Image (cartoon, rainbow, N blue to C red):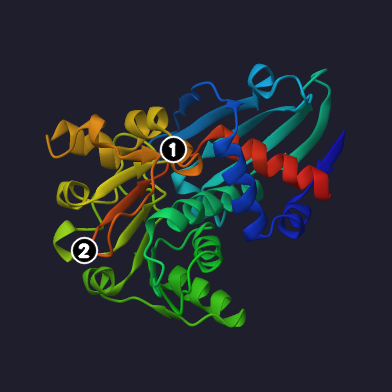
């Protein structure tokens, strides 16, 4: 069994390849049971961590037995207080196994795998939902995912300028400096409402429990890419933003059960579960065309899908 560290994951997973692997995975057949969620309580004054177990495997019956495929499971912790310890909020490991025998093939750095597959899923959705002429990208949040979201969107849309907003300007400035070092035109967003109003694509990757994106500031034609807020009591948009948009999700089961932006909008009567236009399976299989007009506001809510991890892990293992 191989140990594949973060550096090897970085070297193996270029964005176009990961987006392509996810497109094939969502168009194909992968079994992904509902993931396990466990709250890990901490001491007084500390936020609870979340333990996630995310299994998936090749659907051998649907594949006609043509390939043994793979089995995989990701073990992840999400710890909101990790920023105070100079650690990423999301940490974990991925175990990849042979589909025929169950024999372990590799243990892969889960944090590096997660940020790349998450950013790639957003880019995959944007390839159907963002306007083809999208050039201005706003990223809300300056965590480990933010720079990867920029690189991912640039792989599918002609992004010319990037703005980063974060409650802590120091962390946002660090992301801006990282992007500028790569030759990307990036700047610090001071006025969040104004930055939302100017952007063609707005990506939010936070653990916020209060709306950051207000519908009144979202102009026609904008694509909202909501990556954070993976629990029902978290949210990154208000009800008005959800109500004004055509809503797409990575998976219906996950987003409607766990995505706070949708769960809370449904509870408030601003949105209905049946109003979800399509998920990534529908888009990648050609069952839904995606964006219908230049003026349409589109919203993609992602909470993560185990098949994304499996597809990315198989790609890493094949290249390492």
Q: Which residue is pictured at 35% across the width and 43% down the height? A: 248
x, y (%) of residue 272?
A: 20, 33
Left or right side of 243 for 108: right
Badge 1 or badge 2: first in the primary sequence:
2
Residue 218 circle label: 2
Q: Is residue 26 visible?
A: yes
Which one is in front in this view, the residue at disc 1 or the one at disc 2?
A: 1
| The N terminus sits in image quarter | top right
CA gap, disc 1 and disc 2: 26 Å
Compared to residue 249, the image places residue 149 above or below, namely: below
Residue 282 circle label: 1
Q: CB atoms at circles 1 and 2 under 8 Å apart? A: no
Q: Locate residue 313: give its quadrant.
A: top right
Q: Which of 307 and 74 is in front in this view?
A: 307
Left or right side of 228 for 10: right
x, y (%) of residue 183?
A: 59, 83
Q: Nearer the viewer, residue 101 or 190?
A: 101
Residue 60 circle label: none
Compared to residue 154, the image places residue 31 above or below, namely: above
Tag 1's secondary structure? helix
Left or right side of 137 for 317: right
Q: How crowded is mark 1: few (under 14 residues within 10 Å), some or many (20 or more)?
A: some
Compared to residue 206, the image places residue 105 above or below, namely: above
x, y (%) of residue 41?
A: 44, 29
């Amino acid at each position: 069994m191989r140990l594949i560290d973060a550096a090897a994951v970085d070297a193996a997973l270029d964005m176009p390849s990961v987006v392509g692997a996810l497109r094939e995975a969502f168009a194909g057949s992968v079994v992904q049971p509902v993931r396990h969620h466990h709250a890990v309580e901490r001491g007084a004054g500390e936020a609870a961590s979340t333990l996630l177990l995310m299994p998936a495997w090749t659907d051998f019956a649907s594949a006609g037995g043509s390939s043994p495929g793979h089995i995989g499971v990701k073990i992840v912790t999400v710890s909101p207080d990790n920023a105070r310890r100079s650690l990423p909020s999301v940490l974990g490991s991925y175990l990849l196994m042979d589909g025929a025998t169950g024999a372990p093939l590799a243990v892969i750095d889960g944090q590096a795998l997660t940020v790349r597959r998450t950013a790639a899923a957003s880019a995959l959705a944007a390839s159907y939902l963002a306007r083809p002429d999208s050039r201005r990208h706003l990223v809300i949040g300056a965590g480990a995912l933010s720079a990867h979201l920029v690189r991912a969107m640039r792989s599918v849309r002609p992004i010319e300028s990037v703005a980063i907003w974060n409650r802590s300007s120091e962390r946002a400035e660090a992301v801006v400096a990282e992007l500028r070092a790569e030759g990307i035109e990036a700047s610090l967003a001071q006025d969040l409402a104004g930055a939302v109003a100017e952007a063609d694509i707005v990506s939010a990757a936070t653990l916020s429990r209060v709306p950051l994106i207000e519908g009144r500031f979202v102009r026609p034609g904008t694509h909202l890419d909501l990556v954070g807020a993976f629990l029902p009591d978290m949210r990154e948009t208000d009800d008005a933003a959800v109500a004004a948009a055509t809503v797409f999700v990575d998976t219906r089961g996950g987003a409607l059960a766990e995505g706070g932006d949708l769960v809370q909008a449904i509870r408030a009567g601003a949105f209905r579960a049946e109003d979800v236009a399509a998920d990534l399976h529908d888009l990648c299989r050609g069952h839904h065309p995606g964006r219908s007009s230049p003026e349409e506001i589109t919203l993609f809510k992602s909470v993560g899908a185990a098949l994304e991890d499996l597809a990315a892990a198989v790609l890493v293992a094949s290249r390492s």
